[in-house]
Amino acid sequence: MANLHDIRRRIKSVKNTAQITRAMQLVAASKMKRAQDAALASRPYAELLARILAPVAKGVMNFSHPFLEEGRSNARCIVILSTDRGLCGSLNANLFRELPPRTQEIKYITVGRKAAQFIGRTQRDLIADFAISDKFKFPEVRVVIDFAIKAFEDGSVGSVDVLYPRFVNTLRQVPRMVPLLPLAGIQEMLESLGIDKGAQDERELNFEPSVEVILTDLLPLYVRRQFYSMVRGTKASEHSARMVAMKTATDNANNLADNLTLDYNKARQAAITQEILEIAAATAANEN
């Protein structure tokens, strides 16, 4: 059995670790709450976009737009939304398992240092790397999505997909690959925004300058809004996973400290018993 000094030192080290992980858990919890509130705050914008798109799309028969057409290239672009830091459990590992094999012609855009490191380590084709802060604003996100849109429009890639950890709840984050470009169609856009197919608006509406011009401006707004929502979900997933991981680490450290304290008490009791036996034996020897 280890001596008392070594056990005391281990107990102190484990308790210090528990304090650190507890503090990180509290920080992640507060960030998670802000990320969830920010994701909910973007819903009114999506609802407004839906109310605008519904009557506009109803009046369109034959409408063409670069976002609705197949890309001119066979190359595929995947935008990976990951974390900058670790200590968030298996969030990034589960995300990277969803990537296709390297044999395919795929180009990658990464958001987050962990994704960039993985793409570099596996020798995949990385064309851009971006970083987004925790308290990000839309301009930070727009730089990323505009880069992907430009690559699609100039024919560098034929499609754009987004791989991100979808936030389900605090304990569950599911990796999800979502096609972003080209768009499947206007009706699919309306369904993704929660508009019922059978919903009818009987009002007579006039559009200026024209329905086609309005849709031409609304489609990029829709794509950017979808990507912005995914980034919000990624941040909420990151902080949730980190909070759970740090709570688990804190609980494990506390359990280890309790076990070490028990070992310390046993060792101390054994040492005291040994000293009593030695004193008794010395006393008996003197009497004899």
Image: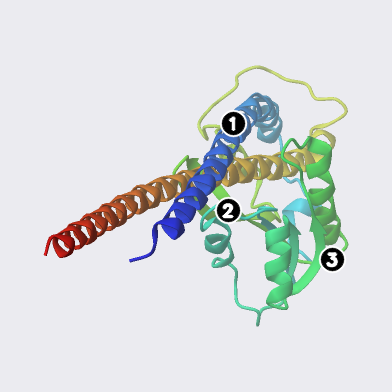
Which residue does the numbered mark 1 point to in the structure image? 30
> Residue 230 at what x, y percent from top left?
64, 45
The answer to whether 30 is drawn above or below residue 12 in the figure is above
Q: Does label 1 or label 2 sit earlier along the sequence? A: 1
Which residue does the numbered mark 3 point to in the structure image? 155
> Residue 186 at what x, y percent from top left?
66, 43
The answer to whether 202 is drawn above or below residue 170 in the figure is above
- Which image quarter is the N terminus in? bottom left
The answer to whether 190 is drawn above or below residue 110 in the figure is above
**Residue at the image position 60 percent from the left and 27 percent from the top:** 37
| Type of amino acid under label 3 | Gly
Which residue does the numbered mark 2 point to in the structure image? 87
- Total marks placed: 3
| Type of amino acid under label 1 | Ser
Q: Is residue 25 visible?
A: yes
Q: Does label 3 or label 2 sit earlier along the sequence? A: 2
Nearest-to-viewer mark from 1 and 3:
1
Q: Does label 1 or label 3 sit earlier along the sequence? A: 1
